[in-house]
Structure formats: C-alpha cells, structure tokens
Amino acid sequence: MFLVGLTGGIASGKSTVASIFHDEFNVPIIDADKIARKVVVPGRLGWKRVRKIFGNEILNQDQTINRDKLGDIIFNDSSKRCQLNKALHFLILLEIIKEIFYYLFKGCKFVILDIPLLFETKFGLNLLSYKLVVHCESEEEQLRRLRLRNPNLSEENAKNRIQTQMDTKTKLKMADYCIDNSKDLEYTRQQIKNIFNILNHSKKLLMCTNEGIV
C-alpha cells in the first residue's frame, strides 16, 4: 500500500475531488478535517487543550467548540493559529496513523490523505508517494466560492482566510499531479479518472520497518 496526499486552497473544490475518488473509484479517504473535529470532542485531550488556549468564549452551550468563533480568531492572529496547530498536531497525526494501519491490514492498494494545509504544515509529507493539488482559475473565483459557501464571512475575512494559506502557484510546483476544478464537474471527473488509472497501476509501496513507516 502507498499514500497519496490531496490538498488545495480553501474553496478550490478539494472536497468534491475527494468525494469522486471515494464514491466513484472506491478509494479510501483519510480526512484530516474530520479527524481534527474528532480529537476536539468535549472531554477529549484536544478539547481540553483548545479550551485552555482560547477559554470558554469559543464553546457552544453544549460545550462543543464553536468553529466559526475559533476561525475568526486563528485567521486573524497567526500566533494563536500556531498555538492551535501545535496543540493538536500530534493528536491528529496519531489518529491518521491508526487509520493508515487499518487500511493497510485491509489490503488496500493506496489511500488518499485529504489534508488542507499539507504543504504549509508539512504534515506527513515524508509518508507520501504522490501529491495531488486541486485548484480553480483564480483567487477571485476562490473568493467568490468561499463567500458563497460561507455567506456570513465579510470580504475582508474571506481574503484573510485565503491569504493565510500558501499561494496556489507554489503548491502547483510541489504537486505530482494537478486537478483543475475551474470548469464543469465532468471536466474534473475526467482528470480524476486519468489520475486514478495512473495510481492504480503504480508499483509504489508503503513499507513498515523497525524504524517506523517509510
């Protein structure tokens, strides 16, 4: 088994691409965002760490973390964003490794790690055989999609969220394969099909040694 990283700028269509890989090509997806939500369930260590850093002000009445309030803080304060990443990084990585071994023992040929900040955090880069980057035609289109998805965001806040991430041109240079999500869904699907065929015929392997996963 080998690992494939999937990333892309906010509102570029990465979730759509991941869904097509999973639903149409039966590729297992390990979603870092879902795992990040899992590790901050009330009472868990991640939740305790977030509460310690940000206080009760970012909690809902049911004690779950209010992601909108947390987002407003971390996208406008880089030091707080670094604190959050440092507090949760290892917990998320541990859950990802558990899922990797689950799919390894199931005999899967490859697994996609859906990690929004793959290049920014270098999260598991040394484990990846291939890196896929999803992009749309421009930052203006990205901004339009983001505000359509999150209508409560002001234009300034939406721009801040985009600018906290590595620029798309740099990501594309670091990718093994790029997926242009600027046009219709069928155009995106055809690119995914071509990449799936390449990955499905790859001879790469994820190997386990006494020093860990390499």
Image (cartoon, rainbow, N blue to C red):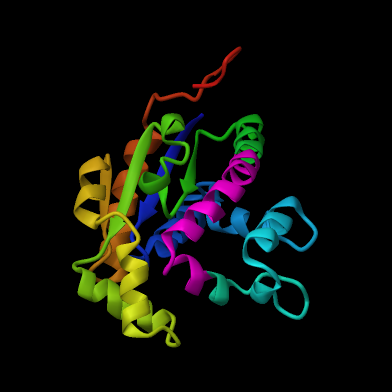
In this rendering, would 123 be left or right of 132? right
Dividing the picture into quarters, in which one does residue 38 lie? bottom right
- At 33% from the left edge and 60% from the top edge, which residue is drawn? 9
Image x and y of residue 176, in percent: 27, 39
Predominant secondary structure, magenta span:
helix
Segment tinted magenta in the rendering: 71-96
Residue sitting nearer the eye, 60 or 117: 60
Magenta segment includes 61: no
Image x and y of residue 99, in percent: 63, 41
The reply to whether residue 11 is visible in this rendering is no
Magenta segment includes 73: yes
Dividing the picture into quarters, in which one does residue 196 lie? top left
Image x and y of residue 148, in percent: 37, 83
Whether 24 is drawn above or below 97: the answer is below
- At 42% from the left edge and 39% from the top edge, which residue is drawn? 4
- At 66% from the left edge and 37% from the top edge, which residue is drawn? 98
- At 56% from the left edge and 76% from the top edge, which residue is drawn? 69
